Image (cartoon, rainbow, N blue to C red):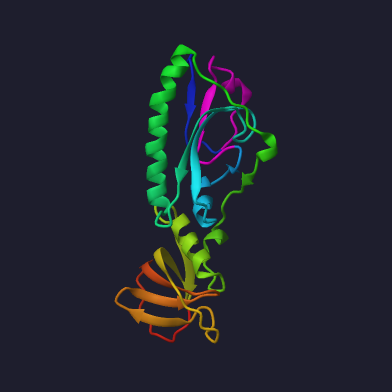
Amino acid sequence: YSPDVIFCFGWSRLIKKKLLNLAPLGVLGFHPARLPNNRGRHPIIWSLILGLNETASTFFFMDEGADSGDILSQYPIKISEKDNATTLYERVIETALIQITEFVPALVSGNYQRIPQDLSEASYWRKRGKKDGQMDWRMSAKSIHNLVRGLSKPYVGANFELAGEEIKVWETELVINNEKNVEPGKVILVDEKGVVVKTGEDAIRLLKTEPELNIKQGSYL
């Protein structure tokens, strides 16, 4: 094979030098974060879990490091409080498609820039493990809500255990509750919208779970 350029999407392992050097223009990688910040694993998930208000769509020339090559194109992407993994994932794809239509002609003509990453600004996100998806009612309602947002579909879902059964949580809503004499994990309200649970700070309404919860007010999760 003698390609002019190679595109790499969704590949989570380092590419060997032989392949990196195969095409004259190199291998173009994609990373949905504002490089050199937030290199590494699961950038869409972590950006939501950490409550960031902005990320980016970045195309870069791959080297033997992890997300460390020169940048070709980078567009900022705003993250709203209403975003979850599904909506952010879709917006990242939309942005990336716009970028591709712009930089491919530049690659063909040779009229493009390679912007070196500032190594002093580099940071890395680790691979997410199963425990990272487990909800702890001692967390603040905001932290639990962000966890649910980050792990919503197409990902695996945040979860907690009830009577030995794993309960997936797909959608939540923050509830202001400053009661000081209620333990985290207590069900303080059950209504037509869902189950409201006291957390370490404020409370959270579980809007969509799998399976659906059948539990009474005053119970503990």
- Residue 59 sits above or below residue 135 on the image: above
Range drawn in magenta:
13-35
Q: Is residue 189 magenta?
A: no
Q: Position of residue 145 (x, y in %)?
A: 47, 64
Q: Position of residue 177 (x, y in %)?
A: 47, 78
- Residue 142 sits above or below residue 38 on the image: below
In terms of image quadrants, where is residue 188?
bottom left
Q: Position of residue 65 (x, y in %)?
A: 64, 32
Q: Position of residue 43 (x, y in %)?
A: 52, 46
- Residue 16 sits above or below residue 46 on the image: above
Q: Is residue 34 magenta?
A: yes
In terms of image quadrants, where is residue 61?
top right
Q: Nearer the viewer, residue 99 or 67?
A: 99
In terms of image quadrants, where is residue 21?
top right
| Viewer can see residue 154 | no
Residue at coordinates 48% horizontally, 60% vertically from top-left?
Answer: 146
Residue at coordinates 38% horizontally, 31% vertically from top-left?
Answer: 98
| Viewer can see residue 125 | yes
- Residue 147 sits above or below residue 124 on the image: below
Residue at coordinates 39% horizontally, 57% vertically from top-left?
Answer: 82
Q: Main secondary structure of the magenta part?
A: loop
